[in-house]
């Protein structure tokens, strides 16, 4: 459960790191296709990378890995 509707819990370091990563990721995505792997903590809630990417207009899909 990624709790996408939940507000971020006040973890300033996590929120700041996600915001900084978003700046970099958006630049990378403009240049070429990329695969991004991050820890679980960076994916959930409103400030997570998944929601931030969706707000930026990207489609985010899970991948099955064997």
Image (cartoon, helix red, strand yellow):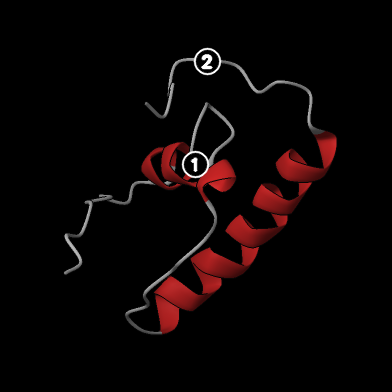
Name the outermost residue toward the bottom: 32
The residue lying at 71 percent from left, 57 percent from top is 20
Which quadrant is the C terminus positioned in? bottom left
Give the residue displayed 41% in from the left and 29% down from the top: 2
Q: How many labels, in total?
A: 2
Q: Secondary structure at mark 2?
A: loop
Q: Residue furthest right?
A: 12
Badge 2 vs badge 1, beta-carbon distance below 8 Å: no
Q: Count neighbours of disc 2 (C-alpha within 10 A) and say few if under 14, some if 14 to 19, many if 20 or more.
A: few
Distance from label 2 to label 1 (Cα)? 13 Å
Q: Residue 44 placed where, x, y %?
A: 49, 34
Residue 31 place in picture, x, y as percent = 42, 83
- Please state the horizontal and vertical placement of residue 37, each as a whole percent of the image: 45, 66
Question: Residue, x 73% and y 43% (percent of image)?
Answer: 14
Does 44 appear above or below 57? above
- Classify the position of the N terminus by image quarter: top left
Q: Which residue is mark 2?
A: 6
**Left or right of residue 59: residue 36:** right
Residue located 37% across and 74% down the image: 35
Q: Earlier in the sequence, mark 2 or mark 1?
A: 2
Q: Secondary structure at mark 1?
A: helix
Looking at this view, is 14 or 31 the one in front? 14
State the mark number for residue 64: none
Left or right: residue 63 compared with residue 4: left
The answer to whether 20 is drawn above or below residue 13 in the figure is: below
Q: From the viewer's perspective, tell me whether residue 66 is left or right of residue 31.
A: left
Q: Which residue is mark 1?
A: 52
Residue 8, picture quadrant: top right
């Amino acid at each position: 459960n990624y709790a996408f509707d939940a507000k971020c819990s006040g973890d300033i370091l996590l929120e700041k790191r996600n915001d900084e990563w978003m700046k970099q990721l958006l630049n990378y995505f403009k240049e070429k296709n990329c695969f991004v792997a991050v820890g679980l903590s960076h994916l959930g809630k409103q400030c997570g990378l998944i929601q931030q990417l969706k707000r930026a207009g990207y489609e985010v899909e899970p991948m099955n890995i064997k």
